[in-house]
Amino acid sequence: MNPQLINFSLTPKTEKATILELCQGNNAKGVCLIYNAVEIEKLPFLAKILAAVQLDIKDDVITISSTIKQSFSLSDLSDELSLKKVIIFGFSPQHIGLQVQFQKYQLYTIGSIQYLFADKLELIEQTKAKKGLLWGALQQMFTK
């Protein structure tokens, strides 16, 4: 018998200063978007999505282009960035230091921050059903 006590992999955490260097935008509305750095060419698509909910990608939000190897603790950044809403494209909650399981396209609130996890941008752009799921979640997130 070979019992396993630990059935997960450990990922080193990227330092706060390194992640802050990746941040772009003025963050006027306390909205953070996290996407995979390999999808940088999808930013115009992302800007169009945000415009549909009256958000400007340069003025209203802060974007963080991360890589698979750049796990970090969003809670380390949340106070400094005054975050209210976080939308994560193509990463799991564990990538940003949340040890929970969330369904994609569902809104979750932890503390004072609302979270939305979605598929990677390329998949959303190519799939009408995923665009619809994202649109519905964004409408729910940004309408009162």
Image (spheres, grey):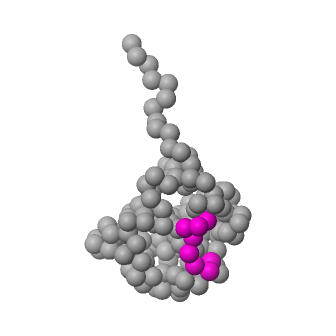
- Residue placed most toward the observer, 31 or 67: 67
Measured as percent of width and height from the top left, residue 142 is found at 56, 77
Q: Is residue 98 visible?
A: no
- Please name the residue shown 38% across and 69% down the image: 39
- Please name the residue shown 39% across and 63% down the image: 119
Q: Quadrant of the C terminus?
A: bottom right
Measured as percent of width and height from the top left, residue 74 is found at 61, 58
Q: Is residue 21 magenta?
A: yes
- Please name the residue shown 32% across and 74% down the image: 125
Check the image and report above or below for 3 versus 73.
Answer: above
Magenta-highlighted residues: 20-27
Measured as percent of width and height from the top left, residue 55 is found at 54, 84
Measured as percent of width and height from the top left, residue 69 is found at 46, 52
Q: Is residue 86 left or right of residue 51?
A: right
Count of numbered badges drawn on the protein: 0
- Please name the residue shown 50% across and 55% down the image: 70
Instruction: State the image quarter where residue 15 is shown.
Output: bottom right
Q: Quadrant of the N terminus?
A: top left
- Residue placed most toward the observer, 3 or 77: 77
- Residue placed most toward the observer, 83 or 43: 43
Q: Is residue 6 visible?
A: yes
Q: Is residue 33 left or right of residue 48?
A: right
Check the image and report above or below for 116 versus 40.
Answer: above
Residue at the right extreme?
Answer: 79
- Residue placed most toward the observer, 85 or 47: 47
Residue at the top extreme?
Answer: 1
Instruction: State the image quarter where residue 89 is shown.
Output: bottom left
Q: Is residue 107 magenta?
A: no
